């Protein structure tokens, strides 16, 4: 780091208080907050990594209501923050309204496509990772019944569910997959109590491996599964550590990398459409000391085989977002 870079980093706060327009990046976390142990937290970790490596600083805000989306975007843009990163599809309409008003500001939105010349749209092939954990679930299940609990009932979460079911059924065609969504409003992302209730109901129907794709709600799913002595599967961040020996694996979605790269490019952020999947390391499954004993060699071999075949194109995982349908249920 040069002396000038150090000076600029140290002077950032003072300049901000003086009302100066700074090329300091900013991030807006979706409902559920940056410590949801899932999607938002992965984004926060990416921003934090950038700050630690560069000595730079960034602005941030955790939303408490839907009405704050456009307000927060405009505030950061008016302040001169650049680039501005948003975590979540729900920012699309606000970004569509704000981006044209600030043509010299770069924006990055995760999980949605916004076609503006100053916007980077980052989407993930979650169906690919969900297929892998579906293979693992089918291999680990002793009852032949597994579960899926989504957050808000939207096409994106149906995409997770469809990939998961496809992986389960490819491994055990006779398996049963119980599916529930937590709700139809953004509150569904942050309702661990409801997540726990749905988990208990699925367990009562025989599910012994339950995949949660529900943001903060998933914390309740993982806890209820651990309490009942059945396996769970985490999402977005590596959640294996939350309940060692109970979380079979986690479907990792490298939101942290998306944020880190956006901050790293800064004002020179390249815009356009970015897709992250298994082939380029944007999606994967988690294997570490917390699940090593339960993620057996047999499970790993099956998952690795599926991973290689998805990357090669031998296995094509259906993308629910392409036509809002799922060939397997």
Image: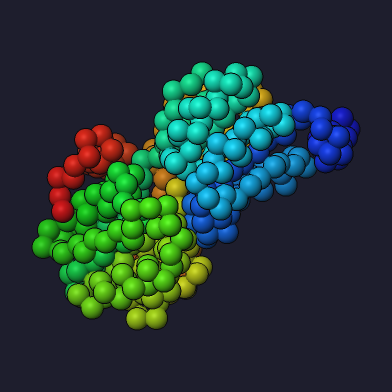
Give the quadrant of the N terminus. Answer: top right
The residue sitting at 61% across, 22% down in the picture is 102
- Which residue occupies the extreme left position in the image? 174
Is residue 50 or residue 187 the one in the foreground? 187
Whether residue 261 is visible to the viewer of this picture, yes or no, is: no
Q: Is residue 108 left or right of residue 161?
A: right
State the image quarter where residue 294 is shown. Answer: bottom left
Left or right position of 52 against 146: right
* Above-or-below relation of 222 to 52: below
**Relative to 137, does residue 132 appear above or below in the rendering?**
above
Image coordinates of residue 290 in percent, x first then y, are: 48, 69
- Judged from this view, the residue extending furthest toward the front is 67
Q: Residue at x 37, y 56 (%)?
A: 151
| Along the viewing direction, whichever of 126 and 120 lies nearer the viewer | 120
Residue at image coords 53%, 59%: 36
Q: Nearer the viewer, residue 239 or 279?
A: 239
Give the quarter of the image for residue 85.
Answer: top right
Q: Is residue 9 above or below residue 119?
A: below
* Residue 97: image location, x then y, percent: 51, 27
Query: Number of numbered discs present?
Result: 0
Q: Is residue 190 left or right of residue 52?
A: left
- The location of residue 154, given as percent across then percent down, is 32, 47
* Outermost residue toward the bottom in this view: 228
Residue at the image position 21 percent from the left and 35 percent from the top: 323
Query: Quarter-wise, where is residue 136 in the image?
Result: bottom left
- What x and y, as percent, mark residue 311? 32, 39
Is residue 204 at all visible to an observer of this figure?
Answer: yes
In the rendered view, how is the structure colored? rainbow
Relative side of 264 to 253, left or right: right
């Amino acid at each position: 780091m040069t002396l000038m870079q150090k000076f600029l980093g140290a002077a950032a706060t003072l300049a901000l208080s003086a009302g100066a327009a700074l090329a300091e990046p900013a991030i807006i976390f979706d409902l559920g907050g940056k410590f949801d142990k899932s999607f938002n937290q992965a984004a926060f970790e990416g921003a934090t990594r950038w700050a630690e490596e560069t000595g730079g600083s960034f602005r941030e805000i955790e939303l408490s209501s839907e009405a704050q989306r456009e307000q927060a975007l405009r505030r950061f843009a008016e302040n001169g923050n650049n680039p501005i990163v948003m975590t979540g599809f729900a920012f699309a309409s606000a970004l569509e309204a704000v981006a044209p008003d600030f043509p010299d500001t770069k924006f990055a939105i995760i999980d949605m496509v916004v076609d503006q010349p100053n916007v980077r749209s980052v989407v993930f092939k979650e169906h690919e990772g969900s297929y892998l954990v579906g293979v693992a679930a089918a291999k680990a299940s002793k009852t032949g019944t597994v579960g899926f609990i989504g957050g808000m009932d939207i096409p994106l979460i149906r995409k997770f569910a469809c990939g998961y079911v496809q992986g389960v059924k490819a491994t055990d065609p006779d398996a049963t997959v119980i599916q529930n969504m937590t709700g139809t409003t953004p509150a569904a992302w942050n309702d661990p109590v409801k997540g726990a209730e749905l988990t208990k109901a699925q367990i009562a129907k025989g599910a012994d491996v339950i995949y949660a794709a529900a943001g903060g709600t998933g914390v309740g799913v993982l806890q209820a599964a651990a309490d009942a002595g059945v396996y769970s599967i985490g999402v977005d961040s590596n959640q294996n550590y939350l309940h060692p020996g109970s979380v079979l694996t986690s479907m990792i979605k490298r939101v942290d990398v998306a944020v880190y790269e956006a901050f790293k490019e800064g004002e020179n952020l390249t815009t356009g459409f970015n897709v992250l999947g298994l082939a380029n390391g944007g999606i994967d499954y988690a294997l570490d000391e917390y699940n090593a004993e339960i993620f057996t060699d047999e499970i790993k071999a099956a998952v690795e085989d599926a991973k290689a075949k998805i990357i090669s194109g031998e296995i094509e995982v259906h993308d629910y977002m392409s036509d809002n349908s799922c060939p397997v249920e």
